[in-house]
Amino acid sequence: MTAIDPTRTVKDLRQQLAKWRAAGETIALVPTMGAIHFGHLSLVELAKSKGDRVVVSLFVNPAQFGPREDFATYPRDEEGDLVKLGEAGVDLVFVPDIAEMYPKGFSTTVTMSDLTEGLCGAARPNHFNGVATVVTKLLWQVAPDVALFGEKDYQQLLVVRRLVHDLNIPVEIAAAPIVREEDGLAISSRNAYLSPDQRKRAPIFYQTLRELAQDLESGRGCDSAIVKARYKLEGAGFRVDYVTVRDPDTLKTLEGPVKRARVLAAAYLGQTRLIDNLPVPLPTS
Ligand code: AMP
């Protein structure tokens, strides 16, 4: 077991990065909230193919949690994470504490309209502003050549792309596909909250979204396919936040003949909020 030593301050981070830069090496950044799992490790693997040095950040960002959300109980395992990331060949793990990221008097927020307002943004009003703020800080702190994000958090990925475009941040944003458990459940740190019974039922979420995608592919009307999916999820004990089909680039509702779409959904099993999404090629007629 080879744990990697964490870097805790922006000053130390920049000192190390400056050495790699001086040697002409490129940097790939993987931002995470820790509780490292195979989804995160797939981003690390992709990062290795994209940059000479891989930096992973571990920071449970209070600014992206609502007052009644799970900030206090969010899974944390720094020691285990440092072993997993060391074994995965990561070059630097940045683990700032809250005071390092949000020093006393901190009063700047990156806010974004439009993309952040629907879907997860509707249920979690300040969530994406918290994400936009912390991602902007991390991109400025690390100044990577490439930063990697998972399609698991599809709306977040689009928010990050928009942010980088709008603020002219010179970084490539690369996306990685969703890593799933064998039964199809998208891997997530929050899956640890599921009781054994809920964990058994959880794969119905992805199965239902796949059926919805298949229904759309075979020409079933969008509204009726969505009603069917919602009905199935509710029947299996999920409390549905949203199930929807959107334009994959803008997340707007579909209008007119379109070739591509994205199924996106969020639902609660007990207290646990699950999200998932998948692409759909639509029949062209
Ligand atoms: P988190 O620690 O949940 O904030 O996730 C950090 C990064 O890992 C984000 O870009 C997520 O989209 C990505 N990620 C989380 N779970 C998965 C997964 N199952 N497959 C692919 N990427 C993931």
Image: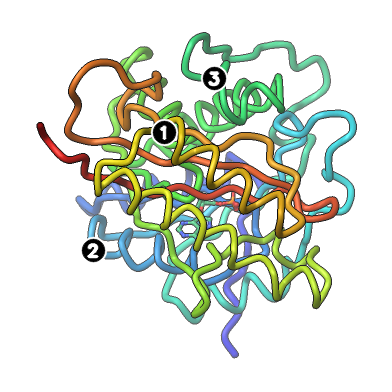
Q: Mark 1 points at which residue?
A: 245
Q: What residue type is labelled 3?
A: Thr
**Does dot 3 land on a helix, a strand or a loop?**
helix
Structural distance between the alpha carbons of marks 3 and 2: 30 Å
Colour scheme: rainbow
Q: In this view, does 195 lie to the left or right of 115?
A: right
Looking at the rendered structure, the kind of residue marked 2 is Ser
Front-lying residue, 213 or 267:
213
Residue at (59% x, 64% y) in the render: 204
The residue carrying pointer 2 sits among few (fewer than 14), some (14 to 19) or many (20 or more) residues within 10 Å by Cα, namely: few
Find the residue positioned furthest to the bottom: 1
| 252 vs 133, nearest the viewer | 252
Q: Residue 116 carries which label?
A: 3
Q: Name the residue under label 2.
A: 49
Residue nearer the viewer, 275 or 1: 275
Q: Residue at x 84, y 38 (%)?
A: 69
Choose the circle earlier in sequence order: 1 or 3.
3
- Which numbered mark, 1 or 2, is in the foreground of this view? 1
Q: Position of residue 115 (x, y in %)?
A: 47, 18
Residue type, numbered disc 1: Val
Q: Residues within 10 Å of mark 3 (few under 14, many from 20)?
A: many
Ligand 1 within 8 angstroms of badge 3 C-beta: no
| Alpha carbons under labels 1 and 2: distance apart | 32 Å
